[in-house]
Image (cartoon, coloured by chain):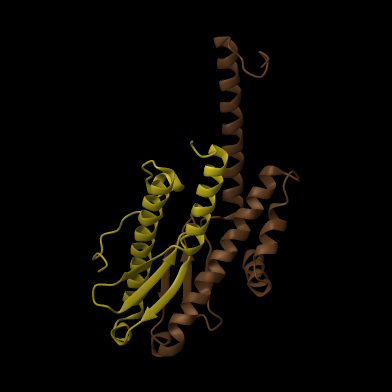
Chain colours: A brown, B yellow
Amino acid sequence: MSDRERPTDPEAMMRRLEQMQAEAEAMLAKFNELSERLGADAVEVVSEDGRIRVKLDAEGKVAEIGIDEYAMRMRQSLAPTIMALIQEASATHALKMAQMAQSLVGDKIDVMGLVNRDMPEGLRDRARDNLDR
Amino acid sequence: MPEDPAEDMRRKAKDIERLAVELEGEAVSEDGAVRVVTGAAGNVKELDLRMSAYQMSGVELGELIVATIRAADRRTQADLAQRVGAIMGAPVTPDDLGGSGLAPIDVEEPR
């Protein structure tokens, strides 16, 4: 193995480490900027009648579920509606994350293509509508 | 004769892949009003509400569902870490698998 592939000189290794750190920091800065611009920590979806809402945290986990008192009377449909909203919110979050990843990796990997392929069409359309709002 | 290490690693990867798809964990709120099943990816697979759930206010029920989802997720992630550790033959914590899910919260533990 050549010296170029595996530097043994401590100074060269240090320089390489510093370069890697600088690259990682630049990537992180870009990620934070994108995260702010796309509002990654604010995915919130609301049912069609506006009576139930689901909000996710920045990691995409369910953080808040709001149910108004009228919706509490819709016993049979309550759980399925909440489930559908969680699914829609998660899909929206996934799309948002994919958009961010796509802008980070550029055209090296088709991240959006992967997500679009794996997400059911109806769900994807609703998630896109949420992003456009 | 020891097994081919590459083949061994492929088998382990396959076992973990299957876990990621099949593993689920359940939590039930203390009063039994809310039952949740989550998957390895933190996805909510099932949400059941019992009659007593409808006696609560909307705010209370919303909070209880979130707490129960978190409890189920914590359990699933701990189980996942334990099983992945067993497959790899080394201890694994939920943090090693990309975070422990949600931060612990001060609600009653699931049964």
Q: Is residue A27 left or right of residue B96?
A: right
Residue A128 is situated, as x and y percent measured from the top left of the image, at: 66, 66
The residue nearer to you, when weighing B2 against B25, is B2
- Residue A74 seen from this side: no
Q: Is residue B36 left or right of residue B108?
A: right
Placement of B97 over or under B62, stated as above or below: above
Placement of A132 over or under A21, stated as above or below: below
Q: Residue at x 63, y 64 (%)?
A: A131
Q: Residue at x 36, y 79 (%)?
A: B58
Residue B101 is situated, as x and y percent measured from the top left of the image, at: 41, 54
The residue nearer to you, when weighing B56 against B21, is B21
Q: Residue at x 44, y 62 (%)?
A: B23
- Residue A131 seen from this side: yes
The residue nearer to you, when weighing A16 against A37, is A16
Q: Quadrant of residue A79?
A: bottom left
Q: Is residue A97 left or right of residue B23?
A: right
Q: Is residue A42 left or right of residue B72?
A: right
Q: Residue at x 66, y 19 (%)?
A: A5
Residue B95 is situated, as x and y percent measured from the top left of the image, at: 40, 45
